Image (cartoon, grey):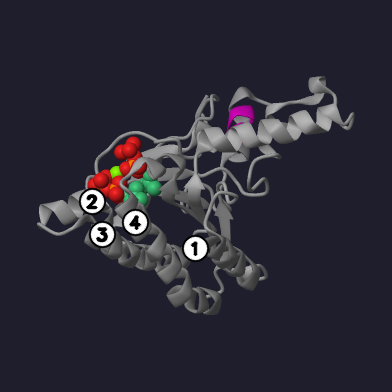
């Protein structure tokens, strides 16, 4: 096999989506800038969060229509507990309202909901709602909507390490067998592909403890608008930016001619 053929083959194997680079299979979004959206209008921060829920509805619909398989959204981080109590109360109330109002529609639209993050410390009624959303939609085979709630990537990796340590302790696993693949299989949603692209709104350019393990080769797209202004056109714009990127995964791109 010629060098060119080898490098072409490698490149094809490395493409993650069903149709190569065109449609990302997994899109993850850091929905940021609700507070600044509100402040810019002289409104309370909660109004930004309310409008943020509307942007989320539009985005879920658009993601389904665009043929994306998995949409992961960062809705509350492990570190967001450090916000004022009143804002935390507002955010929890919005999550409750979102699930109560939208779950039936999501189910009707064949959306499969999953949740990542730490559940144990959450209020019991929120835990019940998250479980209800997962349970009701578990057989749906449309868009997979992964809600990152009370989620931190370092915490998720520590959880995986704890699961592995337990298996070693119980004699079911040898420490020598711990590989990146095995660790990945102990994360919160081991069967999902890594995100092809991570979009962050608001202009901030950081991951803020989101999907650190899974982001190893994700394309990062930073969008200079606040989350409440995000919509289908913004999603299409971010995907167009993703398509212009050249993913190499440490290898070489397909060579032609020689
Ligand atoms: C994102 O908007 C929502 C959450 C983090 C829960 P922010 O609330 O972070 O808004 P900014 O970044 O302060 O503008
Ligand atoms: C990240 O946004 C978390 C969510 C979008 C849920 P933050 O607003 O909490 O992140 P920092 O504090 O600007 O890094
Ligand atoms: Mg923010």
Answer yes or no: is residue 26 visible: yes
Q: Nearer the viewer, mark 4 or mark 3?
A: 3
Q: Secondary structure at mark 3?
A: helix
Label 4: which residue? 235
Residue with the mark numbered 2: 35
Q: Which residue is mark 1?
A: 67
* N-terminal-most mark, 1 or 3: 3
Provide the residue span drawn in magenta. Answer: 6-10
Crowding at dot 4, Cα within 10 Å, few <14 / some 14-19 / many 20+, comes out as many
Count numbered badges in the picture.
4
Mark nearer the N terminus (2 vs 3) = 2
Residue 46's disc number: 3
- Discs 2, 3 touching: Cβ within 8 Å: no
Nearer the observer: mark 1 or 3; the answer is 3
Ligand 1 near label 3 (Cβ, under 8 Å)? no
- For marks 2 and 3, give the one nearer the viewer: 3
Q: CA distance from mark 2 to mark 1?
A: 31 Å
- In x, y percent, where is residue 10? 62, 32
Classed neighbour count for the residue bearing mark 3: other residues with Cα under 10 Å, few (<14), some (14–19), many (≥20)? some
Horizontal and vertical percent for residue 140?
63, 71
Task: Look at the numbered disc 1 and give the secondary structure of its residue.
Answer: loop
Image height check: is 208 above or below 177?
below
Left or right of residue 180, residue 238 in this image: left
Q: Is 131 located above or below residue 239 in the figure?
A: below
Give coordinates of residue 216: x percent, y percent.
Answer: 52, 31
Q: Tell me what residue is drawn at x 54 percent, y 65 percent.
A: 125
Q: Residue at x 75, y 32 (%)?
A: 164
Depth check, mark 2 against mark 1: the one in front is 2
Q: Earlier in the sequence, mark 2 or mark 4?
A: 2
Within 10 Å of disc 1 (Cα), the crowding (few <14, some 14-19, many 20+) is few
User: For the view shown, which residue lies furthest in the right direction?
Assistant: 171
């Amino acid at each position: 096999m010629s060098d060119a053929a080898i490098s072409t083959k490698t490149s094809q194997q490395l493409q993650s989506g069903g149709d190569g680079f065109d449609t990302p299979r997994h899109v993850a979004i850091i929905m940021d800038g609700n507070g600044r959206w509100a402040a810019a209008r002289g409104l309370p921060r909660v109004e930004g969060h309310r409008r943020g829920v509307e942007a989320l509805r539009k985005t879920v619909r658009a993601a389904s229509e665009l043929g994306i398989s998995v949409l992961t959204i960062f809705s509350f981080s492990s570190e967001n507990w450090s916000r004022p109590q009143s804002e935390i109360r507002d955010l929890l109330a919005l999550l409750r309202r979102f699930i109560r109002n939208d779950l039936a529609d999501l189910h009707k639209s064949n959306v499969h909901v999953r949740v990542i993050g730490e559940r144990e410390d959450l209020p019991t009624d929120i835990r019940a709602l998250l479980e209800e959303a997962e349970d009701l939609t578990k057989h749906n085979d449309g868009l997979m909507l992964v809600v990152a709630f009370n989620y931190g990537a370092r915490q998720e990796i520590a959880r995986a390490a704890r699961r592995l340590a337990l298996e070693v302790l119980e004699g079911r696993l040898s420490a020598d067998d711990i590989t990146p693949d095995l660790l990945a299989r102990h994360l919160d949603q081991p069967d999902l592909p890594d995100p092809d692209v991570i979009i962050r709104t608001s202009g901030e350019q950081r991951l803020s403890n989101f999907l650190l393990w899974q982001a190893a080769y994700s394309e990062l797209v930073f969008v200079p608008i606040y989350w409440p202004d995000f919509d289908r056109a913004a999603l299409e714009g971010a995907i167009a930016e993703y398509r212009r990127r050249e993913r190499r995964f440490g290898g070489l791109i397909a060579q032609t001619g020689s």
